[in-house]
């Protein structure tokens, strides 16, 4: 199985490689895997890397930007340079499908040292959203070709739009002396791990170095995994393997530079169970201004029914309930309808949107910001016939297709909408929504990557006005 499938990479991923011990090799291997699947990516850096060596006498590399399209040639990937994101985007567009589908390497300039100067982090969302680009792969850290490092205060250079951060270490760092010959920024690592400089590094300390060094830098919507490389040449010590199975993050072990392609094994898999957000901040203008989400159907409030559906369907608690002006009424309703778990754990959490009048986008963005990098189930609190079974059916389809953009409920009329399960790779885009933009603004160009699950009965019914409420109550009573 390809590594991108093992990592369950979705659309519009921004994958950032940090640490040491094989980042460039993994970057190239991932790019090739995408290309073998017919997908184009952008390979770049936010620091400095070696470019695809442009030479005037060899074909294969076009260079754009800094005065327009150039004619420098070279082996390997096409190189696109530019002083602005727009200039780079234009260069990628001109590049088109040339170079046998090979994905471009992008930067701002080639330095006198021969290294490629990387792109500013605020360019990354622009590159990610270019037509025909499946992912952006970024080397976001330097290690001076050593197998282990400690990041300085200004490292790594991660964009807020990152969706996956892979922290790497070469297994040849087991038991090497903690000095500058073997470790990049050895004194920083000694302080980080409270180890004596110059002494051999115990294998279990490699995992601590990655987690302590990088966990605090991971952006809001991203997840962190650790990858130990070169296991084919340097077998991992048993104590490191034991520590990996107890790690607080996903852990992978293997050889990314294998002739057959990356060969890795997941030692610690973090649960994929999605977060859920219930949107309950609407102003209820068509209901005369009353808080419709606190109205009842068969003795349970609308918002209570939505939270019960999410929990019963398999969402990770606590369910995030985005409320507006009626936040205290929503809190009281949930306190009655969804009591605390027997172990005392929170089953729901109220998030207050201070400006619900600006539209659903702000509420959805607020929920995405608290999803912890998980896939996201979006429910509306005014769909009282959505049940735990509805959510289970959506998740069943989702789990069989983990790389798609979304799974959504489809009404008999052929339109799709909430509830919808959204790939965590799209959280940065969801988190930037404003105004009346809902998830459809992010998903509308995804085509058949939005899977549709047929609604049963009245699952897709929205209660927007008094007449809708009367019909819903009549249908609810007829089911008993």
Image (cartoon, rainbow, N blue to C red):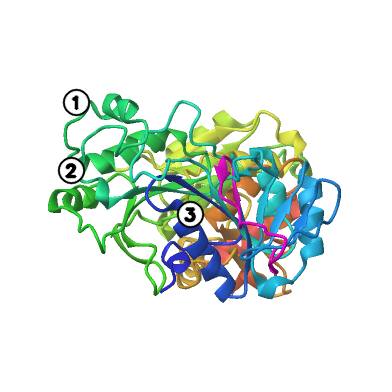
162, 414: nearer the viewer: 162
* Disc 3 from disc 1: Cα separation: 30 Å
Mark 1–mark 2 distance (CA, rounded to whole Å):
13 Å
Mark 2 crowdedness (10 Å alpha carbons): few <14, some 14-19, many ≥20 = some
Residue 407: x and y in percent read 58, 66
Checking the image for residue 175, the label placed there is: 2
In this view, 98 is above or below 252:
below
Q: Which of the two labelled residues, at mark 3 and mark 2, occupies the earlier sequence position?
A: 3
- Please name the residue that numbered disc 1 is placed on: 196
Q: Nearer the viewer, residue 221 or 411?
A: 221
Q: Residue at left 32%, top 50%?
A: 170
Tell me the element at label 2: loop
Residue assigned mark 3: 24
Instruction: State the residue at coordinates (54%, 39%).
Output: 158
Q: Quadrant of residue 214?
A: top left
Q: Main secondary structure of the magenta part?
A: loop
46 inside magenta stretch: yes
């Amino acid at each position: 199985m390809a590594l991108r499938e093992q990592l369950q990479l979705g659309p519009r991923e921004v994958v950032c490689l940090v640490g040491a011990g094989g980042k460039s090799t993994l970057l190239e291997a991932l790019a090739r895997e995408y290309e073998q699947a017919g997908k184009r990516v952008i390979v770049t850096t936010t620091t400095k890397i070696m470019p695809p060596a442009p030479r005037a006498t060899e074909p294969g590399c076009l260079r754009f930007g800094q005065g327009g399209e150039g004619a420098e040639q070279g082996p390997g990937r096409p190189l696109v340079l530019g002083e602005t994101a727009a200039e780079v985007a234009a260069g990628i567009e001109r590049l088109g499908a040339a170079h046998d589908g090979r994905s471009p390497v992008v930067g701002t300039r080639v330095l006198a040292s021969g290294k490629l100067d990387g792109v500013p982090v605020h360019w990354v969302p622009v590159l990610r959203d270019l037509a025909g680009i499946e992912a952006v792969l970024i080397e976001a850290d330097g290690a001076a070709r050593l197998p282990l490092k400690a990041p300085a205060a200004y490292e790594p250079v991660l964009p807020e739009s990152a969706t996956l951060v892979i922290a790497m270490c070469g297994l040849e760092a087991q038991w090497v002396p903690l000095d500058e010959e073997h470790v990049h920024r050895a004194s920083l690592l000694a302080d980080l791990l409270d180890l004596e400089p110059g002494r051999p590094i115990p294998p279990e300390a490699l995992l601590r170095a990655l987690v302590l060094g990088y966990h605090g830098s991971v952006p809001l919507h991203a997840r962190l995994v650790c990858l130990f490389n070169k296991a084919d040449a340097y077998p991992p010590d048993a104590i490191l393997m034991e520590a990996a199975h107890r790690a607080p993050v996903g852990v992978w072990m293997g050889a990314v530079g294998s002739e057959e392609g990356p060969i890795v094994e997941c030692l610690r898999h973090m649960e994929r169970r999605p977060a859920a957000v219930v949107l309950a901040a609407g102003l209820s203008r068509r209901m005369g201004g009353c808080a419709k989400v606190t109205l009842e159907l068969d003795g349970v409030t609308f918002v209570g029914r939505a939270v019960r559906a999410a929990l019963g369907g398999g969402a990770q608690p606590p369910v995030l309930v985005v409320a507006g002006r009626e936040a205290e009424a929503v809190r009281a309703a949930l306190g009655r309808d969804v009591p605390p778990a027997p172990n005392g754990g929170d089953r729901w959490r109220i998030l207050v949107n201070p400006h619900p009048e600006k539209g659903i986008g702000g509420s959805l963005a607020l929920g995405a910001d608290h999803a912890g990098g998980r896939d996201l189930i979006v429910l509306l609190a005014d769909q009282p016939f959505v049940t735990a079974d509805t959510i289970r059916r959506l998740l069943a389809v989702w789990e069989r297709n983990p790389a798609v953009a979304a799974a959504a409920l489809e009404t008999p009329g052929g339109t799709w909408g909430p509830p919808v399960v959204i790939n965590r790779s799209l959280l940065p885009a969801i988190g930037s929504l404003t105004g009346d933009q809902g998830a459809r603004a992010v998903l509308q160009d995804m085509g058949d990557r939005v899977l549709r699950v047929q609604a049963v009965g009245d699952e897709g019914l929205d209660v927007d006005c008094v007449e809708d409420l009367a019909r819903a109550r009549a249908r609810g009573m007829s089911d008993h």
